[in-house]
């Protein structure tokens, strides 16, 4: 692969984006980081990008190899008031719509667009195994993910290869959801959430990054891909395995009413909804998750 092929990445300072930038550079890519405007001086590899107005200098992306669009407001940043839900929606759907519009206006637009999404698109599926053929659900996160993906339709119609990464719960011992859970379990006060029967589709951060690179470099890859371990677990199984990995009990369940009292509608969407997703397309097309077994993963990382 030639050196210095250019890739633009939005959300490049975030959990997944920062790791992806490091991986791309190690593979010989030149990475252009799309950042929100700030008072600091921009570096040569940075461009100003705003979720409302888009790129300040879109012409700087003429001739790049691809764009990986990961930016979006943290869905757990605040309680879900109507205004907060609007911010979440706009940070994904309106922002992507604006970015797509600017890319289509370029003389030499990128031929590849990789967009973030989430397995939340499927809604609550109980214990049913779901792959990429499952239709979208009807709750708030399903609507967000559905419209987020649909915002790229003009690019697909213009001949751009578009792929969407439907992320599960991304695990990393140093960042994200796992870091928030670990203190409770180390103090011996962790436990299942609700009845614990809801499935959690999880994925290791290393597999997310490798999978994104695979999508970029596989010229046949397009459409939605579930980025999850092939072995989803119930919340009860997850909490038991986590507690066992650090040698602590998991005996303090959090009842549904308490979660809903503390978090409102967010509790159902993020903690109590069941999604038993599998990476059927990735597997069929030749990409294998390195971390498929949760027990082994936690034993290696904790």
Image: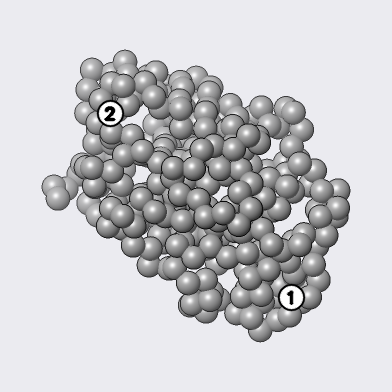
The image shows residue 150 at horizontal and vertical percentages of: 46, 27
User: In percent of the image, x 83 and y 60: which residue is there?
Assistant: 255
Q: Is residue 256 left or right of residue 42?
A: right
Q: Secondary structure at mark 2?
A: loop
Q: Within 10 angstroms of label 1, few (less than 14), some, or many (20 or more) residues?
A: many
Let me know if residue 179 appears in the view.
no
Residue 57: quarter of image: top left
Most extreme residue toward the left is 2
Residue 42 shows which numbered tag? Answer: none
Residue 160 shows which numbered tag? Answer: 2
For disc 1, the marked residue is: 250
Q: Is 147 in front, or is 180?
A: 147
- Residues marked 2 and 1 touching at CB (< 8 Å): no
Let me know if residue 188 appears in the view.
yes
User: In percent of the image, x 44 and y 42: which residue is there?
Assistant: 133
| Residue 211 position (above or below residue 190) | above
Q: Is residue 33 left or right of residue 144?
A: left
Q: Is 133 in front, or is 8?
A: 133
Q: Secondary structure at mark 1?
A: loop
The image shows residue 36 at horizontal and vertical percentages of: 50, 32
Q: Is 81 in front, or is 133?
A: 133
Q: Is residue 19 left or right of residue 3?
A: right
């Amino acid at each position: 692969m030639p050196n210095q092929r250019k890739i633009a990445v939005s959300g490049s300072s975030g959990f997944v984006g920062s790791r992806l930038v490091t991986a791309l550079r190690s593979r010989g890519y030149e990475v252009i980081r799309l950042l929100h405007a700030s008072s600091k001086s921009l570096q040569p590899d940075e461009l100003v990008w705003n979720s409302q107005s888009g790129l300040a200098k879109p012409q700087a992306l003429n001739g790049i190899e691809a764009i990986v669009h990961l930016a979006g407001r943290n869905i757990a940043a605040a309680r879900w008031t109507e205004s907060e839900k609007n911010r979440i929606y706009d940070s994904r759907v309106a922002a992507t719509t604006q970015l797509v519009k600017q890319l289509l206006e370029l003389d030499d637009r990128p031929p590849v667009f990789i967009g973030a999404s989430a397995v939340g698109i499927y809604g609550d599926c109980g214990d049913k195994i779901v792959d990429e053929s499952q239709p979208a659900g009807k709750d708030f996160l399903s609507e967000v993910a559905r419209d987020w993906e649909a915002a790229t339709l003009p690019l697909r119609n213009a001949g751009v290869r578009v792929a969407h990464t439907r992320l599960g719960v991304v695990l990393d011992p140093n960042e994200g959801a796992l870091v928030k859970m670990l203190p409770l379990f180390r103090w011996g006060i962790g436990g299942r959430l609700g009845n614990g029967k809801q499935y959690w589709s999880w994925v290791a951060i290393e597999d997310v990054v490798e999978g994104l690179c695979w999508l970029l470099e596989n010229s046949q890859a397009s459409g939605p891909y579930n980025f999850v371990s092939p072995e989803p677990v119930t919340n009860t199984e997850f909490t038991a395995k986590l507690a066992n990995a650090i040698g602590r009990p998991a005996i303090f369940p959090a009842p549904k009413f308490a979660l809903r009292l503390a978090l409102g509608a967010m509790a159902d969407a993020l903690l109590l909804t069941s999604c038993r997703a599998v990476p059927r397309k990735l597997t069929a097309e030749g990409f294998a998750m390195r971390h498929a077994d949760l027990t082994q993963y936690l034993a290696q990382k904790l």
